[in-house]
Image (cartoon, helix red, strand yellow):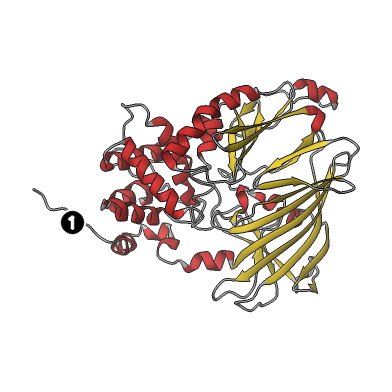
Amino acid sequence: MRKMITFSKSFFLMLLTMMGIASLSPSLVNPQIADDLYRIDITRITAVFDYYPEQYYVDCQTLVEFQMRPGQQRPVIHLDPVIRNNTISLLRLNNENLDFSSNSDVSILSYSDSSQQGIEFQRDLAAGLIHILEISYRKSLPSGYPRFSSEVNDLEGRGNEELFPTLNTPHELARHVLTFRVHSAELFRCIGSGLVVRDNADVQQWTLDTEREMASYTVMFVIMPEEDTILEERNIGGINVRVLAFIGGASINSAFALLETWLPELEANLGPFPMPHGLSIFLVSSGGGMEYYGGTISSLWALDHEVFHMYFACSTVNSTYRDSWLDEAIDSWYENSINPFYSPIAGDYRSNIVSGRTAAAVGFDRRAYNEGSRIIEAVARELGGRNEMIAFLRHVHSLYSFAPFTTLEFLDYLENYSGLNMSDRFMTWLYSADDTAVESDLGFYGPHQKVDMTPPELLLNKYGIHKKREK
């Protein structure tokens, strides 16, 4: 019998460096890069949003509590509306008023291989202390239908930095307390992640509290006119499920019919539903979907895919966007592997699905849906089959929820669980440069088609909105 020789992860990193492969993925060998990029650890984000639907804008008052990472001095935050349009009415760091237009107070940073920009504050801050950043600003909303909501797109790497100051990286875990105040005679509805409570106030007001630290890009909320929508709540096996849809839009009954079997299956296979306040769904009529913590904005077509992400993406969290290929691969594998003839990735497959992106890059490689899914099938075959792979995923979810991990750390979990060392194959499949293996066409992978929140034509007519014709 041939003797199997296994090597440690550090050996493979050394080997990659010798081969020149690690140069494509410097954070594999230098974890300091993440600290240099993100610099701060956010503990809490508090915000008040005053929404004026008839005027299409939101006045935002935000407060971020954070600590400096080891060896870092100057804080950086992401807040795209402020960078694009300086509408700041207050900028204060540790009770010192700053001028966003002054180079002595603020500098705008750009990053190679990323569309993101950062706001660097020109103050050196001490480690080991809680620092307070306050920013008040106005955000303009598109004219037309009166809706204020999250619009995250993890494929493109757009998170909630469009709405409040944050770090647009999956591993950033912070508690979020967001208050929404709607200034309108028209009645509105609000659903979202975590605990959402209607407050007694002079205006329509809701408070969203995630109650725990979680990734900012997974915070969801949707605020829309009450008379345009239907909201129904049911309990499925102890899970409170809220479905919001446009009148004349997607079928709420069809969504509940799917969830009546899907949620119990996921609990049986992967463990208890990970969000204590259940599931909030904004059900749209067409397009794909996007997952959030305890919620999704999704069509019926993508709903099962997005709800699976409550386990892998929203509670087990990856360290970087490029590592989040793993969430999509696991999700797609779970659906595809029902087919007994589903085939694993070829042993000689080569790609740069992970190493082709730097630690600063936003978004993940689209090959996750197809090639990535087949990589997970290869792991399943080594473990003994679909049931054995599901048992391993349940193990990972139970031990590592809300403890961000990389692709390589996932391999460590696999080896610790089963004794199986697949480092050499993963390095070839995900970390090898091969110009013949290119990112796939997104159009092939339905669940992550762009979310379409366009109201039905009846509502468009009500607001005098003319639907754009497709070319």
Q: Indicate left or right for 30 with 105 as reference.
A: left
Nearer-the-camera pick, 92 or 47: 47
Q: Residue at x 60, y 48 (%)?
A: 218
The location of residue 21, given as percent across then percent down, is 36, 57
Across and down, in percent, residue 402 comes to 51, 55
Q: Amino acid at mark 1?
A: Ile
**Relative to 121, is 352 above or below?**
above
> Crowding at label 1, few (<14), some or many (≥20) Cα neighbours within 10 Å?
few
Q: Where is residue 177, by image quadrant?
A: bottom right
Instruction: Tell me: 73 left or right of 352.
Output: right
Whether residue 330 is situated above or below residue 354 in the rendered picture: above
Residue drawn where x is 12% and y is 53% of the image: 3
Q: Is residue 355 visible?
A: no
Residue located 58% across and 64% down the image: 38
Task: Return the x and y of residue 18 as percentages of the image width and height.
Answer: 30, 63
Q: Position of residue 1 (x, y in %)?
A: 8, 48
- Looking at the rendered structure, the secondary structure element under dot 1 is loop
Residue on which disc 1 sits: 5
Q: Quadrant of residue 120?
A: bottom right
Does the image show residue 62?
A: yes
Tell me: 146 left or right of 324: right
Residue 11: which quarter of the image? bottom left
